[in-house]
Image: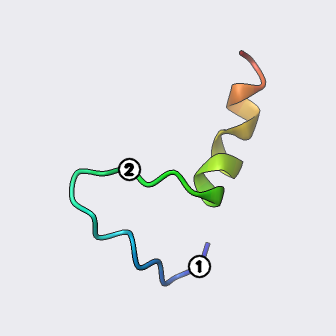
Amino acid sequence: MPLEKPYLDVPGTTIFDAEQSRLGYHLNQFC
């Protein structure tokens, strides 16, 4: 995980990026 992400300070927002995609990949295989 990169330490510096300029978009992490957006309040009330979950940013879906490549890292989030990798984390959810196996869960989505159940669908």
Identify the residue shown where x is 38% and y is 50%.
14
Residue under pointer 1: 2
Q: Amino acid at mark 2?
A: Thr
Residue 14 in the image: above or below residue 7: above
Where's residue 30, x and y in %? Answer: 75, 18
**Label 2: few (<14), some (14–19) or many (≥20) C-alpha neighbours in 10 Å:** few
Colour pattern: rainbow
Q: Return the residue nearer the eye: 18 or 24.
A: 18
In which quadrant of the rendered image does the N terminus lie?
A: bottom right
Task: Looking at the image, tell me whether mark 1 or mark 2 is earlier in sequence order.
Answer: 1
Identify the residue shown where x is 23% and y is 51%.
12
Residue under pointer 2: 14
Identify the residue shown where x is 44% and y is 55%.
15
Q: Is residue 7 left or right of residue 13?
A: right
Where's residue 19, x and y in %? Answer: 63, 59
Q: Return the residue nearer the eye: 24 or 15.
A: 15
Disc 1 to disc 2, how far (Cα)? 17 Å
Where's residue 2, x and y in %? Answer: 59, 79
Dot 1: element: loop
Mark nearer the viewer, 1 or 2: 2
Where's residue 22, x and y in %? Answer: 70, 50
Identify the residue shown where x is 65% and y is 48%.
21
Dot 2: element: loop
In which quadrant of the rendered image does the C terminus lie?
A: top right
